[in-house]
Amino acid sequence: MRLIKLLKTAKGLYIFLVIIILVVMFNRFTYSYVPLFTQYIIDMLDVGTSTANFPTFVTDIFEQGSDVIQIILIVATTMVFYQAMRFSMLFVEEYAQGRFSEGVSKKLRDRLYNHIQSLDYSFHNNADTGDLVQRVTSDIEAMSNFLANRLPEFFRLMATITFGAIQIYAISPTMVLIALGMVPISAATSIWYFKKVDKSFKVIEESEAKMMTVIQENLSGARIVRAFANEKFEIDKLEKENKNYSDHFLHLQTISSRYWGFSDMIAVTQYLVTILIGVIFVRENIVITGGQIIAVLMLLGMLIWPIRGLGRMIGDFGRALVATQRIYELLEKPSEFNINGTLTPEIKGEIEFRDVHFKFADGKNNLLNGVSFHVRPGQTVAIIGRTGSGKTTVINLLSRMLETTDGDIYIDGVSIKDIEKHHLRKHMGIVLQDPFLFSKTVYENIAISNPRTEKGNVYKAAQIAAIEKDIHTFEKGYDTVVGERGTTLSGGQKQRVAIARILVADKPILVFDDSLSAVDTETDMMIRSALKDKGSSSTTIIITHRITTAKEADLIVVLENGTVSDIGTHASLKDKPGLYQKLWKIQGELEAEFMKLIEEAKS
């Protein structure tokens, strides 16, 4: 069973589960004797003797009394101690189930979350965050609830019916046939219920996932929603998914109410029939005594209510099966580290692209066609091109977020396909156009890439990234907590904090993926000048649309339609006909005008 196989990484939980099942069955066994105490007392008061099916050593204890009253007192006292022992075992059972449930939940959450972390870039690009959150939370809870509660309950049910039937049979073989008369009907009804709810649970899980996705997207994009005054559209969208979820859930509740109503009718009918026949037998002095009929009615609950509870068990089983399927959909997706290198060479920063081609799995045409260029250690290279020319894809291939379709990429003479991915990425610092900041302080967001760094390094990185002045304007300075995803900062401030974060990490390869797009030209110049003065030996790759940024690079690579159309320095490209010259004529004039204004302002 897939549910059980999910515990294969936690063998200790298997043993714990077996212990729980044994304790559960033992508790049901001990409960089967509780009605016999009542039978014994009633029989002693009625006829002065009892045929209650106790072990001999127990009846020997009861018979130590000299008269009926003493015997009843001994029986009552024994029952008190017996029940105290049973309640202690019930406490152990409930405690063990709780520990097991939390243990299973933690193990499964860790396993699923770790696996999600290992899935490739393409998966995360297309995954719905709300759906993933639900699988790691609600689906895990549904599975752990079934394993910790419903699976032991199944064995509890079997043990209850077995021990209850044995005790009734010991009282009267005739009564056991009457008591079990409705069990097949209850079982058949439960099977019908399972078939009905199994499909419903899958639809409910899917509709809930869609609703969660809408909520997550709305909360994450709250500023965008308000900026476009789009609240009504988002509310209507949620109401639609919410209604869809509610309708499916109400359909399930309708099925459940029919099942529980019919089950209650069967249970009451079973009691009435048993009582009626029992009364007739007692009045006619046939087969059974008054004490025995009372015991049979008490034991009857051990047969009827567990069967009735089968519906709840089956319902949770259906939900657990759906949850298991959804979890396995993720666990069966191959990890990106299934294809990995083994080498961990020293990385100094020499980069070479050799005839690199790339095409997405669902694409028809190559995005990159024979891209080749060489970067020496410590050089700064700028990659420019129109939107969609493949600039960011080059970086994703370099970090092995994507794999080349053909050709190869070398770092310090070693193919990146032979380098272990974690090792490769640990030596690369990438700043994205829309960086992600954590809901922590500004200081923590900068230092997170190197938690052991000295405070001075954090302050120096903030200076180079031209964010220090902004930080000092915050009420709590470096201790200011930025909002979720850095929403309390402007786009330019987020980019500069992310740049400082990478500088603190001090990687041999630095990549700026259009990460200065949200800062003004003057700040852009300040950051570039500070980076140059920093004297870093890191190889730096800058993806940009600004020629003013690119022109300071040691090497400029111009991408057009997935190929390298030009490569060289600013001096060699500005006078050469092509895309770079066109951009320079437009942006260069603007830069000259801007510099003129700055000089005039200074004077």
Image (spheres, helix red, strand yellow):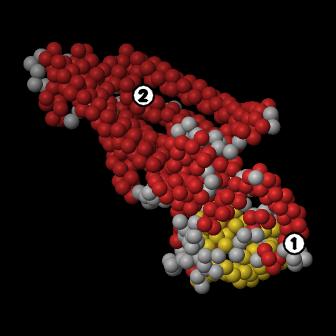
Q: Residues within 10 Å of mark 2 (few under 14, many from 20)?
A: some
Q: Secondary structure at mark 2?
A: helix
From the image, state whether disc 1 or disc 2 is nearer to you.
1
Near-viewer residue (1 or 243): 243
Mark 1 and mark 2 in contact? Answer it, CB < 8 Å. Answer: no
Q: Is residue 393 left or right of residue 537?
A: right
Quadrant of res 380 = bottom right
Where's residue 149, x and y in %? 45, 41
Residue at image location 59% in from the left, 25% down from the top: 261
Near-viewer residue (515 or 302): 515
Residue with the mark numbered 1: 581
Q: Residues within 10 Å of mark 1 (few under 14, many from 20)?
A: some
Where's residue 470, x and y in %? 62, 45
Q: Is residue 3 left or right of residue 192?
A: left
Q: Secondary structure at mark 1?
A: helix
Residue with the mark numbered 2: 301
Residue at image location 87% in from the left, 72% down from the top: 581
As measured in the structure, the alpha-carbon distance from the residue carrying label 1 to the one carrying label 2 is: 90 Å
Near-viewer residue (203 or 377): 377
The tally of labels here is: 2
Which comes sooner in the sequence, label 1 or label 2?
2
- Residue located farthest toward the bottom when viewing the structure as drawn: 413
Whether residue 266 appears in this view of the structure is yes
